[in-house]
Image: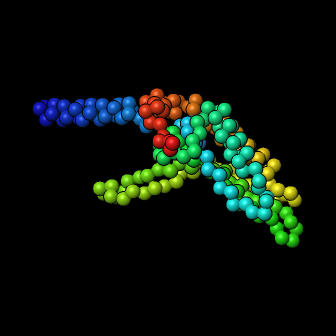
């Protein structure tokens, strides 16, 4: 009889602890945030324009830069000339254009790539003795274009469209519950990216 009582007591103790551990783990659940949803965390963007176009095929680079800055700021996304540290609330918008004028046909040919990236340093190794610097791609759009004159109009149209789509995704994803939870727990002002003067 005492053995049966002891087995029942041990079983009850173990079962009770398992149920308690299970309940505790449910309280400590982890929210999974997809790459697209994580765009809702972005509040600061550094704009980087890489002009690799020759032959007079792209001449409105500064206008594009100003338009992008204006579009982002009108969407409630702060822009910076240089982010020294991005953190989860900052990212770099890279506008790469590669192009040239052909010799025989005198046509401008170009490739446009618009991407939003976040740079992160991660410690690695048993004692964290290695620092790995990685670039995470958050958004990307690209296209090829040709014109008998220059690529200005096409680049402006495509960049405007891509940046509008990006800004809309950022704003839309700020309404997701996991993003709201993060912003409430880790306020932007306390975790603001470092911006170069």
Residue 79 in sight from this viewpoint: yes
Residue at x-position 57% and y-position 41%: 80
At a point 72% along the width and 50% down the height, the residue shown is 61
Residue at image coords 46%, 28%: 184
Question: In this rendering, would 9 be left or right of 165?
Answer: left
Instruction: Answer above or below: position of 105 versus 158.
Output: below
Q: Quadrant of the N terminus?
A: top left
Q: Residue 71 lies in what quarter of the image?
A: top right
Q: Nearer the viewer, residue 89 or 178?
A: 89
Judge whether residue 34 can be spotted in this image: no
Name the outermost residue toward the top.
184
- 116 vs 106: above or below: above
Residue 90: x, y in percent? 53, 42
Pinpoint residue 128: horizontal percent, then vertical percent.
Answer: 33, 55
Q: Is residue 74 left or right of residue 109?
A: left
Residue 123's spot in the image, x, y percent? 38, 53
Left or right: 64 as drawn, with respect to 128: right
Q: Residue at x 48, y 55 (%)?
A: 134
């Amino acid at each position: 009889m005492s053995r049966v009582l002891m087995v029942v007591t041990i079983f009850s103790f173990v079962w009770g602890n398992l149920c308690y551990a299970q309940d505790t783990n449910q309280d400590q659940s982890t929210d999974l945030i997809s790459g697209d949803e994580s765009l809702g965390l972005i509040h600061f963007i550094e704009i980087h324009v890489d002009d690799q176009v020759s032959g007079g095929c792209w001449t409105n680079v500064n206008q594009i830069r100003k338009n992008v800055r204006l579009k982002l700021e009108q969407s409630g996304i702060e822009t910076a000339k240089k982010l020294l540290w991005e953190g989860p609330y900052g990212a770099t918008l890279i506008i790469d254009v590669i192009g040239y004028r052909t010799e025989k046909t005198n046509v401008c040919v170009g490739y446009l790539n618009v991407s939003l990236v976040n740079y992160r340093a991660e410690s690695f190794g048993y004692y964290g003795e290695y620092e790995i610097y990685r670039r995470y791609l958050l958004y990307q759009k690209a296209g090829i274009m040709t014109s008998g004159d220059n690529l200005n109009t096409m680049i402006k149209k495509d960049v405007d469209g891509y940046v509008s789509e990006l800004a809309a995704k950022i704003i839309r994803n700020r309404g997701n519950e996991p993003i709201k939870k993060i912003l409430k727990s880790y306020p932007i002002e306390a975790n603001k990216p470092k911006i170069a003067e």
